[in-house]
Structure formats: C-alpha cells, structure tokens
C-alpha cells in the first residue's frame, strides 16, 4: 500500500503540477506591407488560451511554459512562433494566401487545411451555404475525388475515391452519425448540411481516430451545437430557399447567446418538396413480353415519382466555457418523411392483375407510394480541461447516444422497420513529450441494430468495439513528421436463422420456415492500423506531402450476415458467411478474413500568390476487398433459387458478398488563378480506376471521371459564379453492368449584398443544370430509373445579425 501511495503521488504531481514559468507575450501582427492585421487570432498551440489582435494589430497573452504561438487569419497563411516561457515581444508577419485556410476539427492536432498531411477539403461559410443540398452526397459531389451514390435527391451518400458505404465514416462533431445509410443506398444520412458550420472531407484512410469504418475516408459535419467559445451577445441567422425543379421550400434559423461563460445554441430547419422533374427519358422495361402481346413503345417520363421530402430538425445546446474547463451538452431531433423511388413489389400476382382488368380497373392499377419515415434522437456531451501543464496539455471527452429508427411505409402500412441505438465515447489526452506533440486516446462504440419486416435482409446484431490510439508529430526544420497507431477489438453478436432456399414449392418452403433453426453467432476481430507521413514546406506557401497507411477492417453485419430480399436494389443479398451448394444456401462462416488496405498518398500544393494548386496521387492496395458478386442464380418467393435458364418474370438476381484482392488508384486536382482582384478561375477534376488484382476485372459502380472549371467574379455588392462539369462515359464496368454515357452540367449563381443596417442580408439565385441536360449517375443502383434533376432555379434570402 505504501508503494502504491508513493507511485500515485508521483503520477498526480507529474500530471497536475503547474509550471513555475509565467510570462507575458506581447506583439503585433502585420502583413507584407507592414500594415496591421486586425482580428487575427493568437493561440497558444495545444492549450485554451487565445486572444484577438486590436485595430493596431497588437496583442498580449499570458503563458505559463515554453511552447508555440499559432497566429491565424482568413486569407493569410498561418504562422507559428516559438516562445521560450520568458517575457518577450514578437512581430509576426502574415503572408496572403490564394486559398481559404480553415482549421480542420477532424485532424485532432489543431491543423489547418494547408498543414494537413492527408488530403482534405473543407466547405464552410457562404461557399457551403451556396452549395448545400438536401443530402451530403449532393452537397459534396463537386469536390475533386468525391462523388455521390444517388438513390434520388433525398438519399445520396458521399463516395470518396470509389469507396462508400461501410468504408466512409460520416461523423457529426467527430462522433458517428449512427444512421442506417451504410446498410442500404435507399437509407438517407441523418446529417443536415444547412445547420453545419463547415463540412470536412478527409481522403484516404482516417482509421486512427475514427475506427475501421473510416478505411476510405471521413466526412465530418461540424456545428456549434455545443459552443466551445464564449458568446457575449445575441447572434442569429435565418434563411429561406425555393427550388423550382421540385417545388421545394426550405426554412432555416439559428440563435446563439451567452453570459458570464454560459452559452446557449438553437437551430432548426424545415424542408418540404414534391417529386423532382427531369429531362424526358425512357423508362426501362420491367417485364418480358408475354405470348400474344404486341411490342409496345418505350414509356417515357419527365419526372421521378416518389421523390418527395417532408423534413424538420431541431437542435438545442448549452455549454460553460471557463479558463480551464469547457463543459457542454446538446440534443437534436430529426423527423423526415421521404419517397423511395423505383421501390417495387416483387412477386406480383398476375392472376390478381387479370381479375382487376376484367373488373375494368386494369389501367388504374399503380403501385402505392413507398416512403420512409426517419426519426432520430441524438444526445452529445463534451468536456475539455486544459491543464496548462508542461507536458499534459489537455484532457477531453466526447460522448454520444443516438436512437435512430427508419420505417418503410408500403400500401399505407408499416412494411419494414430498421432501428439502431448507438453509444459512443472518445477520451483523449493531448501532450508534449520532449519535441513530440501528440494525442493518445480510447474509443468505445456499441451499436444495437435491428430490422423487422419484409425487407429485413440483415438479422439483428450488436456490434461493439474498444480501441486505443496514438498520434504523434514532430518538426524537423521545414519538415513535419506524423506517426500513428490504433488497435481495435471488434465484436459482432447476432441470432442467425438457418433457413435454406431451393427449388421447392410454396408449401414446402413454408414447412421449412417452421423448422428453421436459430443459432447465436459471435465473431471477434482485432484490427490494427498504422500510419506514417511527412509534409515538407520547401518554400513559403509551397509543400509536398507523402503518407503511407496500413488499415484493417472487419465486415459489417450486413456484409457478413445478409440473407434476404433487398427490395431497394431489386436483388437477393447473401453475406460472406453463406455459400450456395447445389441450389441450396448454407451458413458456414469459416475463415472470414479482414479487409486490409495499404494506401499511398502523394500531394503537391501551392497556395501563395495569384496562382495555386493541389494535386493528389493515390494508390490503394486492398487485400480481401468485400464486394457483391453476381452468383448466376435468381430467386423468387414461389420457386426459391433457380438458374438463369429457368428464371421467372419476378425473380431477382442473387448477389453475394465475397472477398478478393483489389487495387484502386488515381488522381485529383484543383488549380486556381486569381486573374484580377475581382476574377478567379478554377480548374478541377478526378480519375479513379478500381480493379480486381487476380483477373484485372473492374469493380462495380465506380464513379465516372470528371473535369470541371469555375469562374468567380465580384463587382461592388454582387458575386457571380459559373461552373461547368463534364462527367465522362463510364465503360470500365463489370459483366453485369451497363455503360453510362457522359454528360455535362452547367451551374450558375448570383449573390447580392443588401445594406440593412445591423442585419447582414444576401439575396441569391442559383441555376443548376442550365442546359437541362439528361444525366445518369453510374454509381446509382437505380440509374436508369432516376436520372439527375433537370433545370432548377433556386431563389432565396439569408440574413445574419
């Protein structure tokens, strides 16, 4: 006991002893012309102290140890200044930058977008508000290397470098959004871009902080629902937008206030819209012609049925921000009804249809609207304590609890209900060990997933993970080196029904269902992730970055245990744990190997002067890549599994998750030139190739390459932009895909700044798809049934006070 007491005292003294060094740093921040920079932020790196420069660019800040000042200001390159812990005066000269610099919250080490080793894009401010769409996928798809899955405009998730679903982690303030968007493409994400302060897209593996689900990248939606800075006055914003292509009206509002360290936040949105219009297109034929039927002309449409939306969100948050302690909590509620396009009822009874036709109602038969009711309650908590210690700088904790439910309504009744209750906690300690600055942490998640109904193709499961991670960086002159590691214990538990499907009649199949066994299945994986990278600032405003990472991912329950009809995709899905033998399905989950990615990233950046660029090259070598493969079998409810030569009209192709080695490689770029103070020209694009390594065949639904250009022009109180993006033909396809023709979209926007005294007001009009081009998204499961929207005028007003 005495030894334990001595050790405990020593640890406590090391953690909480205050440095004897106390100093006052004074200084001035100026630009290249020696003019003062007003409202520049001067921040003690790794700690909570921060001040703003005054009208003369001057500042004063108290410090208690050696360290580094981080000086930042919009439209300038950030500057870091070493301090020795004694009273001193400094003059900091900031260099203008040709690109916006934004602190990336998902980086964990207070890096801005220009200092990141891994490629990153940040949408924020008016740029985000102008590009915001109802879904994350549509909001972000114009960024280099980013595309959208597109299951209609209300259900569209981001695809990063050809990877999506379970490989792209979507987070809100660093915690998983915890919806069902990774289970099926018809499930919408629960994040609303209208309420966001900024949206960050981290390309390549970001598994160290966010887990194995981030093997392809991270999309982090940042909001201020838990204020982390003191708010001294009442501020707010309001916005209204009308979209003509779908008759959609969107309202959004935000209010924030505070007093004596206590802060309060409110935001809410309301969106209602109808089915969206398209250029005229041919609908695909649903059934083969029957004997005696004459060949009919292809049916055409100029809208996509069942794509309405009725959504409302509300969020409340409060916090206390003191000198050392920040403590806060928030609550959010989402209620959304949205249509699910191309949602068909398979197994349709032709005899019943004939009876209706005899009764004189044949021409009036239409499938009832199938739509989703999404509800989510989300609690988040945040605690941060700045120790002001020489080597333990900050301790923080983020916790979240999400109760998500997604019900699909068919024929006016609840068909299938998906639910997901998630608990998550992330504790971190930011530290300095000698010349190394880093973060160590613990990450816990538990997800309780359930599905009940006709489309419950994945059984209920409980997934838990416990992880430890470490991220360290050190500067060697102009080079910053970053090393990281994460070890994660990942466990899935589920009750699996051992039903077999084969060439039996309905009565026999019914008997089998009664005799089906249920076993308790459990799988445990240990995922290891490692990373190393460096960025070399070889000249002011120019850098080159290289990173290498090794990431492991265990299968989701949907990839491992699926066994049933997935109506949204019109397929029968089987997981990795099953195999088909002589027309029968057997559950034998043996030798399931983790998906293992080795990723290389090389980036070249210039962000100084009138000309700048970012060019990223990547190569991703993935062992045991999970993907869905066509088995050659078909399934219908009456006959079970059948081969292609025996297929019936309403049968669905059987796709099974399998694992093979794959390689994905490509590039993305963004080049800009400031022609004059009022004119900026951008050129951007990306290319991704994704193949299996053994036979060199292409992976399915890989987005087409794109190339675009944007012109921005500012005059007086007006801001104009014109963007043209060409999506190339996608002919690099699998045997069961069809190629997708290329198309070009032109978009324009105009903003006018109104002078209304204390209210900063903007009137705006955006015109999307100016030429009313017909475009099909290759990565969509329903591309032939749901083309992109036609010409759309988006009119709105927003105000800030």
Image (cartoon, rainbow, N blue to C red):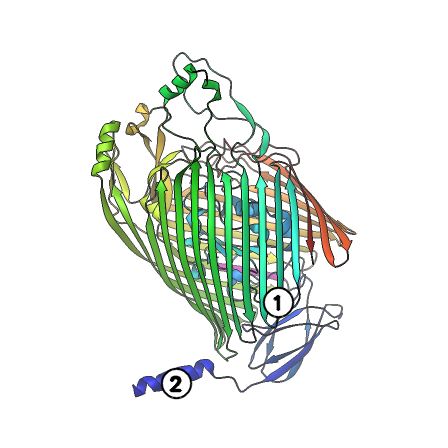
Marked residue nearer the N-terminal end (1 or 2): 2
Residue 504 seen anywhere in this rendered image of the structure: no
Residue 256 visible from this viewpoint:
yes
Q: Depth check: 702 or 13 in front?
A: 13
Residue at image coords 45%, 68%: 428
Within the magenta stretch, is there residue 273?
no
Q: Which mark is residue 419?
A: none
Q: What x and y, as percent, mark residue 739?
A: 48, 32
Task: Give the answer, above or below, for where 347 lies relative to 528.
Answer: above
**Where is residue 252 drawn, in percent x and y?**
61, 50
Residue situated furthest right in the rendering: 716
| Magenta segment boundaries in residue numbering | 541-547
Which percent across, then down, holds residue 652? 36, 31
Please name which of the two marks, 1 or 2, marks the residue nearer to the observer: 1
In the shown orientation, is residue 446 left or right of residue 771? left
**Which class describes the residues within 10 Å of circle 1: few (<14), some (14-19), or many (20+)?**
many
| Residue drawn where x is 52% and y is 84% of the image | 19
Position of residue 182 in the picture relative to residue 724 (left or right): left
Which residue position holds label 1? 258
Secondary structure, mark 2, is helix
The single residue placed furthest to the top in the displayed view is: 292
Residue 9's label in the rendered image is 2
Per the picture, the main secondary structure of the magenta-coloured stretch is strand
Q: Which quadrant is home to the N terminus?
A: bottom left
From what the image shows, is residue 89 above or below residue 623?
Answer: below
Q: Tell me how far mark 1 sits from mark 2, CA to CA.
A: 39 Å
Quarter of the picture containing the C terminus is bottom right
Please tell me how many numbered marks the rendered image carries. Answer: 2
Q: Give the side of residue 229 with respect to residue 385, left or right.
A: right
């Amino acid at each position: 006991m005495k030894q334990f007491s001595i050790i405990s005292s020593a640890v406590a003294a090391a953690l909480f002893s205050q440095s004897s060094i106390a100093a006052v740093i004074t200084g001035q921040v100026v630009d290249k012309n020696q003019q003062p920079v007003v409202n520049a932020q001067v921040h003690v790196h790794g700690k909570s102290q921060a001040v703003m420069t005054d009208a003369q660019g001057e500042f004063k800040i108290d410090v208690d140890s050696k360290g580094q000042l981080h000086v930042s200001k919009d439209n300038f390159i950030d500057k870091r200044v070493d301090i020795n812990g004694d009273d001193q005066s400094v003059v900091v000269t900031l260099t203008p930058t040709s690109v916006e610099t934004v602190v990336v919250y998902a980086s964990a080490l207070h890096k801005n977008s220009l200092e990141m080793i891994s490629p990153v894009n940040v949408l924020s401010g008016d740029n985000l508000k102008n590009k915001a769409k109802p879904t994350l996928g549509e909001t972000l798809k114009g960024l280099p290397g980013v595309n959208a899955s597109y299951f209609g405009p209300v259900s569209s998730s981001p695809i990063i470098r050809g990877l999506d679903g379970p490989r792209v982690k979507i987070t809100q303030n660093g915690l998983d959004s915890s919806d069902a968007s990774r289970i099926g493409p018809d499930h919408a994400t629960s994040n609303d871009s209208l309420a966001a302060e900024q949206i960050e897209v981290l390309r390549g593996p970001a598994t160290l902080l966010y887990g194995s689900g981030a093997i392809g990248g991270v999309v982090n939606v940042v909001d201020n629902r838990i204020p982390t800075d003191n708010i001294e006055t009442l501020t707010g914003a309001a916005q209204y937008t009308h979209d003509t292509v779908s008759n959609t009206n969107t309202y959004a509002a935000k209010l924030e206030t505070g007093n004596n360290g206590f802060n309060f936040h409110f935001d809410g949105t309301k969106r209602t819209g109808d089915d969206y219009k398209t250029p005229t297109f041919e609908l695909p034929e649903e059934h083969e012609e029957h004997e005696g039927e004459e060949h009919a002309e292809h049916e055409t449409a100029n809208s996509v049925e069942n794509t309405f939306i009725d959504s409302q969100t509300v969020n409340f948050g409060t916090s206390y921000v003191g000198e050392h302690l920040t403590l806060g909590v928030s609550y959010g509620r989402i209620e959304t009804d949205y249509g699910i396009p191309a949602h068909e009822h398979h197994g349709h009874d032709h005899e019943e249809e004939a009876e209706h036709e005899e009764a004189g109602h044949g021409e009036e038969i239409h499938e009832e609207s199938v739509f989703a009711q999404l509800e989510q309650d989300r609690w988040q908590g945040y605690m941060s304590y700045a120790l002001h210690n020489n080597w333990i700088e900050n301790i923080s904790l983020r916790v979240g609890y999400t109760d998500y439910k997604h019900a699909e309504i068919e024929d006016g009744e609840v068909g299938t209900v998906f639910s997901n209750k998630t608990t998550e906690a992330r504790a971190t300690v930011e530290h300095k060990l000698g010349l190394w600055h880093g973060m160590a942490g613990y990450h816990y998640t538990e997800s309780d997933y359930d599905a009940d109904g006709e489309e419950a193709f994945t059984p209920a499961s409980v997934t838990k993970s416990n992880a430890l991670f470490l991220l360290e960086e050190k500067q060697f002159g102009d080079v910053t080196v970053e090393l990281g590691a994460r070890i994660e214990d990942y466990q899935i538990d589920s009750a699996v029904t051992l039903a077999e499907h084969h060439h039996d009649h309905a009565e026999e199949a019914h008997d089998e269902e009664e005799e089906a066994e249920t076993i308790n299945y459990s799988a445990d994986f240990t995922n290891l992730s490692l990373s190393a990278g460096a960025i070399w600032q070889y000249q002011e405003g120019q850098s080159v970055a290289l990173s290498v990472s090794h990431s492991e991912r265990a299968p989701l329950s949907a990839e491992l245990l699926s066994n049933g009809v997935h109506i949204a995709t019109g397929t029968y899905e089987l997981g990795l744990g099953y195999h088909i033998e002589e027309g029968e399905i057997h559950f034998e989950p043996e030798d399931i190997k983790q998906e293992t990615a080795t990723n290389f990233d090389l980036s070249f950046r210039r962000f100084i002067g009138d000309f700048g660029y970012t060019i990223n090259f990547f190569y991703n070598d993935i062992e045991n890549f999970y993907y869905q493969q066509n088995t050659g079998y078909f399934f219908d409810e009456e006959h079970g599994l059948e081969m292609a030569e025996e297929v019936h009209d309403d049968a669905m192709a059987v796709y099974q998750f399998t694992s093979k080695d794959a390689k994905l490689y490509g590039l993305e770029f963004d080049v800009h030139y400031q022609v004059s103070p009022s004119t900026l020209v951008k050129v951007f694009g990306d290319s991704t190739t994704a193949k299996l390594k053994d036979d060199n065949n292409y992976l399915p639904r890989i987005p087409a390459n794109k190339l675009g250009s944007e012109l921005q022009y500012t005059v007086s109180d007006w801001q104009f932009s014109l963007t043209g993006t060409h999506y190339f033909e996608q002919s690099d396809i699998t045997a069961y895909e069809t190629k997708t023709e290329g198309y070009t979209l032109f978009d324009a926007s105009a903003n006018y700044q109104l002078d209304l005294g204390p209210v900063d007001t903007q009137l705006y009009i955006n015109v999307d798809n100016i030429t009313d081009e017909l475009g099909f998204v290759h990565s969509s499961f329903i591309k032939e049934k749901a083309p992109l929207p036609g010409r759309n005028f988006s009119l709105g007003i927003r105000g800030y006070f």
